[in-house]
Amino acid sequence: MSEETTTIIQQINEPRYVLEVKHMKSGSALVLSISKLRVSGDNLDEVMQDLNQALGDYLGVVDSA
C-alpha cells in the first residue's frame, strides 16, 4: 500500500515596512511623529531602500498636511 501526501506551501505577502504615526503635543502645537517603524528583509541593501522609502512617504504626508 502506497500513500501519497501533498504539501501545500502558502506564501504570505508581508508589507515591506510598517510605519505607525501618532499625534503628540509639542508646546502648544500638535505634531505628527513616528511611533513605530519596522523594516524587514533578507538583503541589507533592499532593507535600506525600503527604510528610505518609508521615511520619504512619511515626509510626503507631513509636508502635504
Image (cartoon, rainbow, N blue to C red):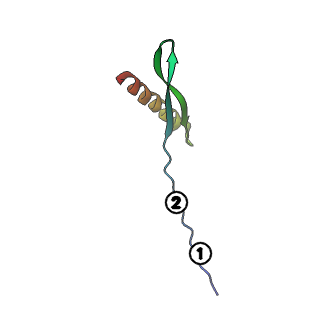
Left or right side of 57 for 40: right
User: According to the image, label 1 marks what residue?
Assistant: 5
Residue 22 position within the rendered picture, expressed as x and y whole percent measured from the top left? 50, 28
Question: Residue visible at 54% across and 29% down?
Answer: 35
Residue 2 position within the rendered picture, expressed as x and y whole percent measured from the top left? 63, 84
Q: Quadrant of the N terminus?
A: bottom right
Residue type, label 2: Gln
In the image, residue 42 above or below residue 29: below
Residue 56 position within the rendered picture, expressed as x and y whole percent measured from the top left? 43, 28
Q: Secondary structure at mark 2?
A: loop
Would you call the spot at circle 2 few (<14 residues within 10 Å), some (14-19), or many (20 or more)? few
Question: Residue visible at 51% across and 22% down?
Answer: 24
Q: CA distance from mark 1 to mark 2?
A: 16 Å
Question: Residue visible at 55% across and 32% down?
Answer: 36
Q: Which residue sits furthest top?
A: 27
User: According to the image, label 2 marks what residue?
Assistant: 10
Residue type, label 1: Thr
Question: Residue visible at 42% across and 24% down?
Answer: 59
Q: Quadrant of the C terminus?
A: top left
Residue 23 position within the rendered picture, expressed as x and y whole percent measured from the top left? 49, 25
Q: Which residue sits furthest bottom?
A: 1
Left or right side of 32 for 44: right
In the image, residue 24 above or below residue 20: above
In the image, residue 26 above or below residue 6: above
